[in-house]
Image (cartoon, grey):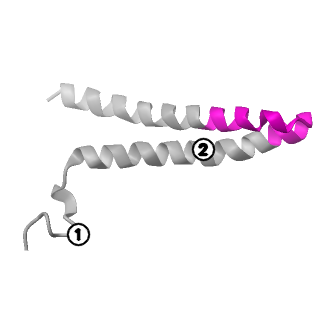
Amino acid sequence: MTSEDDPDPGPDRDPDVDQDEESDNNIAIGLALGAPLGVAIALVTDNWGLLGIGIALGLLFGVAMGRSGDDDEEEGSADR
């Protein structure tokens, strides 16, 4: 069985894939937190058009979380 056939390649798989998956997870977490925030804003203002504001803020938060993790990795690799 070659490494291409193995469904779970283990710790020696491509590190870029892990970073992409983690970025996707951060965006999903931001979206999951932003949707209830948008609902809360919509309920308080009684304007359901503002639901998108919460979702946008959540996505912004998710992207920011992903970017903050990238900075630490870049600084660590520069020290080597």
Name the outermost residue toward the left: 2
Front residue of this view, candidates 68 and 52: 52
| Location of residue 68 with respect to 18 vertically, above or below | above
| Location of residue 48 with respect to 2 vertically, above or below | above
Label 2, label 1: how many angstroms apart (C-alpha)?
29 Å
Q: Quadrant of the N terminus?
A: bottom left
Residue at position x 17%, y 70% in the image:
6
Residue 48 position, x and y percent, is: 84, 39
Res 31 label? 2
The residue carrying mark 1 is 7
| Location of residue 72 with respect to 33 vertically, above or below | above
Q: Amino acid at mark 1?
A: Pro
Element marked by disc 2? helix
Q: Amino acid at mark 2?
A: Leu
Name the outermost residue toward the bottom: 1
Crowding near pointer 2: few (<14 within 10 Å), some, many (20+)?
many
Residue at position x 35%, y 33% in the image:
70
Element marked by disc 1? loop
Residue at position x 39%, y 36% in the image:
69
Q: Main secondary structure of the magenta part?
A: helix
Which region is colored magenta? 40-58
Magenta run includes residue 59: no
Front residue of this view, candidates 73 and 57: 57
Front residue of this view, candidates 11 and 39: 39
Q: Is residue 12 left or right of residue 18?
A: left
